[in-house]
Image (cartoon, helix red, strand yellow):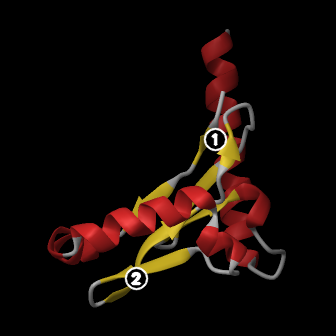
Amino acid sequence: MGFITTISFYNDASIDIQKHPHQTIEMIHKAQLGVQRNSGTNTEGIGSHANAVIIQKPRHASDITIYIHAGNTVTDLYDIEAENEWLVDTAIEHMEEELKRLKAMKK
């Protein structure tokens, strides 16, 4: 088993992604190596878009995590900071609903 890197692309940047394929491929390669995350950022620009993608840290295939997609961003559950009360509340509410749904599937 190897590593997996999750990258979310903002649709607004789709034209720049198409216009800059080499820059996009380089960004993906750097993301797989953890370059952006190791430098303290989780975004990367492509073309004229300063934040064209959100990059999660590379994880081993046996790791388990949950990503929260809310507020025009994607955040690893374990990276949510306590100061971001809105996202914490949103994550709790959503996870409670999803847990009920998953438990109902097992019945």
Pointer 2 with pointer 1, Cβ within 8 A:
no
In this figure, which residue is indicated by the disc labeled 2? Answer: 45
Residue 106 vs 1, above or below: the answer is above
Q: Residue furthest top?
A: 107
Residue 99 location (% of width, % of height): 70, 34
Between 74 and 93, the one nearer to me in the picture = 74
Q: Based on the displayed image, in which of its 4 quarters is residue 102 positioned?
A: top right
Looking at the rendered structure, the secondary structure element under dot 1 is strand
In this figure, which residue is indicated by the disc labeled 1? Answer: 3
Q: Which residue sits at x=60%, y=74%?
A: 36
Dot 1, how many residues are within 10 Å of its Cα: few (below 14), some (14-19), or many (20+)?
few
> Left of 69 or right of it: where is 46?
left
Between 80 and 34, the one nearer to me in the picture = 34
For the N terminus, give its image quadrant.
top right
> Left of 107 or right of it: where is 8?
left
Q: Which mark is residue 58?
A: none
Between 12 and 36, the one nearer to me in the picture = 36
Between 77 and 18, the one nearer to me in the picture = 18
Residue type for callout 1? Phe
Residue 80 location (% of width, % of height): 75, 68
Residue 100 location (% of width, % of height): 68, 32
Dot 2, how many residues are within 10 Å of its Cα: few (below 14), some (14-19), or many (20+)?
some
Residue 64 vs 57, above or below: the answer is above
Residue type for callout 2? Gly
> Left of 13 or right of it: where is 57?
right
For the C terminus, give its image quadrant.
top right
